[in-house]
């Protein structure tokens, strides 16, 4: 094969690899977005092309992301007794789908935010363990979420995340 043909073949293969990596995330991760049964599972399945964390504390997240697909656990919450907790959020989604959910001890899902929203939401908690996850489908944007500190709720940020 001539040098020119080999060079063109390499350029085409490189271009194809870039396109495949740009639309990252497996089909399984992208299909999670509308699958409450999969989201409610205690494990995660996600990928980010880019994630940049801006602020880190036990009860706040502030980050930019691109190419996010799947479900990623951010916090475990344990309520010692019946009560409530308030989430404050500001979410801007430039592409794809993004939401944040709270999974209760019965594995039922409560949407906290979907897409572009700036608000707060108060949730009544029964005694038990809860999981807070973000879920995306080829999403790009930025999000800030904070949880009010409630003395009856223990908040644990997942180690290695944010």
Image: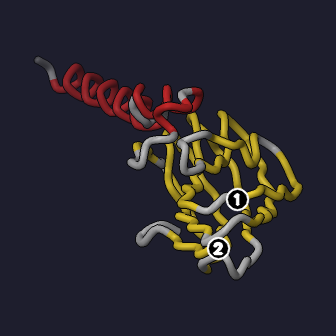
Secondary element at tag 2: strand
Within-10-Å neighbours for mark 1: few <14, some 14–19, many 20+: many
Residue 37 - label: none
Seen from the viewer's position, the closer of residues 10 and 146 is: 146
Quarter location, residue 145: bottom right
User: Which residue is painted at 59% across and 78% down in the image?
Assistant: 58
Rendered position, 155 above or below 108: below
User: Which residue is painted at 19% across and 24% down in the image?
Assistant: 6
Residue 153 - label: 2
Secondary element at tag 1: strand
User: Which residue is painted at 63% across and 40% down in the image?
Assistant: 109
- Residue 141, how many percent across, how many down? 69, 49
- Residue 70, how many percent across, how many down? 49, 40
Does 34 sit left or right of 22 as displayed? right
Q: How many marks?
A: 2
User: Which residue is painted at 73% across and 41% down in the image?
Assistant: 94
Does 64 sit left or right of 87 as displayed? left
Quarter location, residue 15: top left
Seen from the viewer's position, the closer of residues 102 and 27 is: 102
Rendered position, 73 above or below 26: below
Q: Name the residue beneath numbered marker 1.
A: 125
Label 2 close to label 1 by CB (< 8 Å)? yes
Which is nearer the N-term, disc 2 or disc 1?
Answer: 1
Seen from the viewer's position, the closer of residues 124 and 131 is: 124
Seen from the viewer's position, the closer of residues 101 and 62 is: 101
- Furthest residue toward left: 1
């Amino acid at each position: 094969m001539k040098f020119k043909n080999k060079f063109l073949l390499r350029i085409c293969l490189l271009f194809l690899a870039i396109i495949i990596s740009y639309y990252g995330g497996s089909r399984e991760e992208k299909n999670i977005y509308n699958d409450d049964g999969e989201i409610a599972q205690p494990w995660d399945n996600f990928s980010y092309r880019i994630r940049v964390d801006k602020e880190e504390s036990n009860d706040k997240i502030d980050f930019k992301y691109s190419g996010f697909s799947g479900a990623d656990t951010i916090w475990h919450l344990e309520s010692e007794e019946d009560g409530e907790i308030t989430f404050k959020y500001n979410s801007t989604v430039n592409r794809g789908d993004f939401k944040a959910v709270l999974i209760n001890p019965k594995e039922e899902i409560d949407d906290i935010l979907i897409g572009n929203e700036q608000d707060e939401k108060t949730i009544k908690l029964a005694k038990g363990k809860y999981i807070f996850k973000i879920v995306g489908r080829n999403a790009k944007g930025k999000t800030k979420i904070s949880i009010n500190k409630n003395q009856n709720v223990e908040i644990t940020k997942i180690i290695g995340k944010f």
